Image: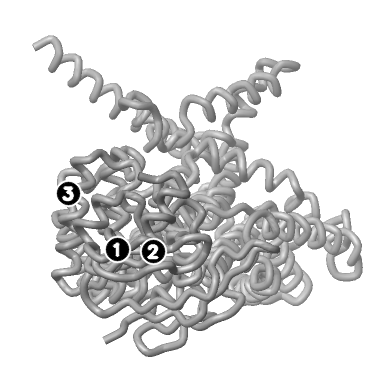
């Protein structure tokens, strides 16, 4: 079944077409990757899907609903949660609190319940705390629960951001270059974590430069160049695709 | 061995530093009750400012926004309390209810359009509302009596009981400050408070997790306006007089000083800041012509070496600086 589907999605900046009539289907379950040389329009595509930018044309359908013109917070509420290429942690909060914020969508309560702090509210807080600690365990940061987010090493910050996104229990998790700035070893562990996330039932869509990570992690790969989708298929098929090879050679990539 | 001793003594110094401003603040408040007179007045004003700044801290410290105009909400509620009790002989609590409602209404009208915009639009709008309310207080003489101000305001009291002694007023204010702090602490340690802190950290990331940023900013703005309104009404009942100058721009400057000296974003900062900043003019008075110089230098020193203010003094010695 298709979870996310883009139909002729286009985004222009003046004369430049950053995303050019892209069609893309992301099947439910598994890991889909979007790759392409720098400036191919991958990040713009992500911003369009997550609502941070609006397309000039085309339609984006998620879980059977048209989300094209929805706001980012509404898209998140419908179950599509993203991370950022430049890690966007809440630097002023502890590692644990960062993940607790991720539980926002699955809890209720405003000013009144904060002031009253009833038994039900306290119970919810305990659940939020337990869920956050569980996710810290999952990404291997359980020892850093009370550290400030800014005190973490870069690779750990990336993992924390993923854990925070998972706290929102997304149907589809969008990862924007999760391996950027990671060591080979960290990137390998990240790949295992992504497979694990998919195995537990969360569909993953990722943008990535790190070819090794993509080849080892993704079930399906879509390739973009100059704003267009030039190929789509399994890692093995993509590796052999002449259009892809040309795009990468022309752009000077290995 | 020597190493562990060093760690222990370091830890002691840290705890000592953290406790120091609290000890000073408690001592000053205790001294006020014993000494009475002028000092009680200073501490009473400090407590009223503390209420104002506990609220401002929700908006600026928790949610990371900026407002130069919360004096407007204090003025709206303060003048409402003054007019309704002095001219129309209302009960103080009923007058405050009207003042609070008016302040919240104005906060809603200013906040609704501006909080949707990113950046400094709200800060500029708040500056404008502060100046507008100040001008109204001066010009609308038939109601506010302009520069002359309003006297004969009912003293602090509830349901017929009036607090007349200065010590009694200070005690009542102290209780109100405690309750205000308690409420702010509960707000911070909740889903609501976490959402505000998330907005302060990264608006984009907050939105990506489903937080309705504009709505939460507006809620924080209204909460802080309510605190400001309470402070405004308390002031007029404690002093039993009000004039436009009371809620002028200097109030904003003093509030910012207290907020940063005490520790922005912390729970105890507003109280510590209010008590200690209120003492500074007394301390520096002996320096005569140089008092502003020392006052300014002291502020700069504190902001550089203790960015979390007096409430964060304990972290001064921790490794990697004062990020906590």
Report, in whole angstroms, how far the alpha carbon at label 1 lies from the one at label 2. Answer: 8 Å
Q: Verify CB contact (< 8 Å) between mark 1 and mark 3.
A: no
Q: Please name the residue that numbered disc 1 is placed on.
A: A238
Number of residues whose C-alpha sits closer than 10 Å to that of mark 3, classed few (under 14), some (14–19) or many (20 or more): some
Q: Residue A24's x, y, as percent?
A: 40, 76
Q: Of the residues under marks 2 and 3, which one precedes in the sequence? A: 3
Q: Residue B4's x, y, as percent?
A: 13, 17
Give the quadrant of the N terminus of chain A.
bottom left
Q: Residue B296's x, y, as percent?
A: 65, 25
Q: Please name the residue that numbered disc 2 is placed on.
A: A223
Q: Please name the residue that numbered disc 3 is placed on.
A: A189
Give the quadrant of the C terminus of chain A.
top left
Q: Of the residues under marks 1 and 3, which one precedes in the sequence? A: 3
Q: Is residue B28 left or right of residue B319?
A: right
Report, in whole angstroms, how far the alpha carbon at label 1 lies from the one at label 3. Answer: 24 Å
Q: Verify CB contact (< 8 Å) between mark 1 and mark 2.
A: yes
């Amino acid at each position: 079944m298709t979870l996310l589907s883009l139909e002729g999605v286009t985004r222009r900046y003046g004369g430049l077409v950053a995303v050019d009539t892209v069609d893309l289907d992301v099947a439910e379950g598994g890991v889909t990757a979007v790759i392409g040389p720098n400036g191919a329009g991958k990040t713009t595509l992500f911003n369009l899907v997550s609502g941070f930018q609006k397309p000039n044309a085309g339609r984006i359908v998620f879980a059977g609903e048209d989300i094209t013109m929805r706001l980012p917070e509404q898209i998140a509420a419908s179950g599509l949660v993203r991370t950022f290429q430049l890690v966007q942690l809440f630097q002023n909060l502890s590692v644990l609190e960062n993940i607790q914020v991720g539980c926002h969508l699955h809890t209720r309560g405003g000013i009144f319940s904060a002031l009253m702090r009833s038994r039900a509210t306290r119970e919810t807080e305990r659940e939020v705390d337990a869920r956050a600690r569980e996710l810290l365990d999952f990404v291997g940061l359980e020892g850093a629960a009370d550290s400030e987010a800014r005190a973490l090493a870069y690779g750990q910050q990336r993992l924390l951001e993923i854990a925070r996104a998972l706290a929102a229990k997304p149907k589809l998790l969008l990862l924007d270059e999760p391996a950027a700035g990671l060591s080979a070893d960290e990137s390998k562990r990240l790949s295992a974590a992504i497979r694990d996330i998919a195995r537990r039932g969360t569909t993953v869509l990722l943008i990535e430069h790190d070819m090794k990570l993509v080849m080892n992690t993704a079930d399906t790969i879509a390739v973009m160049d100059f704003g267009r989708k030039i190929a789509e298929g399994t890692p093995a098929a993509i590796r052999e695709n002449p259009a892809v090879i040309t795009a990468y050679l022309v752009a000077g990539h290995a | 061995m020597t190493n562990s001793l060093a760690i222990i003594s370091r830890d002691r110094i840290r705890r000592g530093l953290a406790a120091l401003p609290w000890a000073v603040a408690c001592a000053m408040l205790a001294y006020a009750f014993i000494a009475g007179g002028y000092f009680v007045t200073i501490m009473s004003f400090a407590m009223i400012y503390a209420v104002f700044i506990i609220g401002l801290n929700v908006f600026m410290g928790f949610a990371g926004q900026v407002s130069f105009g919360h004096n407007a909400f204090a003025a709206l509620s303060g003048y409402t309390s003054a007019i309704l009790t002095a001219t129309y002989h209302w009960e103080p609590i009923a007058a405050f209810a009207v003042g609070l409602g008016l302040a919240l209404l104005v906060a809603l009208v200013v906040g609704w359009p501006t909080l949707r915009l990113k950046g400094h639009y709200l800060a500029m709008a708040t500056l404008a509302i502060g100046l507008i309310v100040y001008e109204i207080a001066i010009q609308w003489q038939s109601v506010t009596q302009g520069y002359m101000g309003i006297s004969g305001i009912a003293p602090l009291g509830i349901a017929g009981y009036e607090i007349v002694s200065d010590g009694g007023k200070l005690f009542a204010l102290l209780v109100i400050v405690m309750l205000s702090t308690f409420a702010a602490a509960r707000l911070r340690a909740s889903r609501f408070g976490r959402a505000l802190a998330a907005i302060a950290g990264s608006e984009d990331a907050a939105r990506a997790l489903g937080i309705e940023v504009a709505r939460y900013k507006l809620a924080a703005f209204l909460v802080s306006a309510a605190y400001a309104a309470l402070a405004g009404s308390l002031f007029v009942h404690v002093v039993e007089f009000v004039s436009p100058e009371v809620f002028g721009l200097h109030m904003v400057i003093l509030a910012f000083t207290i907020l940063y000296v005490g520790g922005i974003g912390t729970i105890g900062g507003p109280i510590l800041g209010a008590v200690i900043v209120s003492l500074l003019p007394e301390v520096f008075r002996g320096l005569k012509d140089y008092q502003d110089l020392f006052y300014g230098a002291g502020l700069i020193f504190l902001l550089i070496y203790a960015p979390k203010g007096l409430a964060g003094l304990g972290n001064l010695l921790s490794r990697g600086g004062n990020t906590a």
